[in-house]
Amino acid sequence: MDGEGVEPCGRPVFVNNPHLDALADDVLYHFSLGTKTHNLPAMFGDVKFVCVGGSPWRMKSFIEYIATELNMEDPKSEYPNICVGTDRYAMYKIGPVLSVSHGMGIPSISIMLHELIKLLHHAHCSDVTIIRIGTSGGIGLEPGTVVITKQSVDATFLPRFEQVILGKTVVRNTDLDESVAQELLQCSKDLNLFETVIGNTMCTMDFYEGQARLDGAFCSYTEKDKQDYLNRANEAGVCNIEMESSVFAAMCKLSGLRAAVVCVTFLDRLKGDQVNSSHEVLHDYQLRPQKLVSCFIKKKLMTKAGSQTA
């Protein structure tokens, strides 16, 4: 489908797959989009910021919040889901900001990222910053603390993402963009609304045993075993635990995207396993990454506008 898009400039979004060139139509199945059925450059060519998070509700809430912050809100708009043809993911857009849900865990976010990276590539986007906003369990932090990830580590505290491809284990780097992390930390200082730290994030394959919880359907270790493990994680610089950051960091690095992870902690895992704060408190916590990332985006857009008028 022909149409005028935004001409690429600056830092492009890379794909490394020669097989894509042979496709007459690249179907982004889980988004219900495609290169033949949709004018992706016209729809997404102006995207400069992508925010991703687990639930569709959270990502719609974010797009509504950022629209207000950027003075782009439309009282008559309900911010329609671009991926209305599927129930796998939800996607919302306002101006240069794209908001996408990714589900829970490494497999779900991995599928979403493959199609998102291709979408940005087909749309000729450039100079894109992508940020995961989410929730996590903290280690030695007060609930409600926001953690900006320095590096994602696995359950053995090593900075790597392992994936089996064609029967062979492939290890990928999980570094995130240090400059974006520092800019986000400065935004938190400017807001002065909640505690924010930079630290390592442990990414696991499971919510229960993989995170040393004692309250799953199965558990073969003791309270002491759990505490020893979490203390070792803390000594390795781990501030929080979630289930998406490693593959997120690895795939964003491969595609040339500047990436960051911003997660609020719901509890201190050294003091318990179950999330038992009130709905109101948890709702307030979930808004904190949104506020921080919105501040970052506003600041970047204001800086760009200032440089263009100078």
Image (cartoon, rainbow, N blue to C red):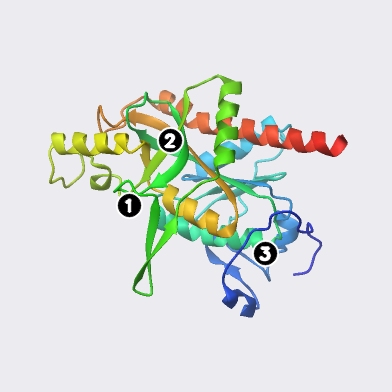
Identity of the residue furthest to the top in this view: 192
Q: Quadrant of the N terminus?
A: bottom right
Task: Determine whether, in the image, residue 267 is placed left or right of residue 52.
Answer: left
Q: Position of residue 226 (x, y in %)?
A: 19, 37
Q: Does the residue at mark 3 contact the one at mark 1 (Cβ under 8 Å)?
A: no
Q: In whole angstroms, how far apart are the C-alphas of marks 3 and 2?
A: 34 Å
Residue 85 in view, yes or no: no
Q: Say which of 169 and 80 sits in front.
A: 169
Residue displayed at 29% across by 32% down: 269
Residue designated by label 2: 199
Mark 1 is surrounded, within 10 Å at the Cα level, by few (under 14), some (14 to 19) or many (20 or more) other residues, namely some
Residue designated by label 1: 205
Disc on the earlier residue, 3 or 2: 3
Give the amino acid type for the residue marked by disc 3 in the picture.
Answer: His
Above or below residue 277? Residue 250 is: below
Q: Position of residue 240 (x, y in %)?
A: 37, 36
Disc on the earlier residue, 3 or 1: 3
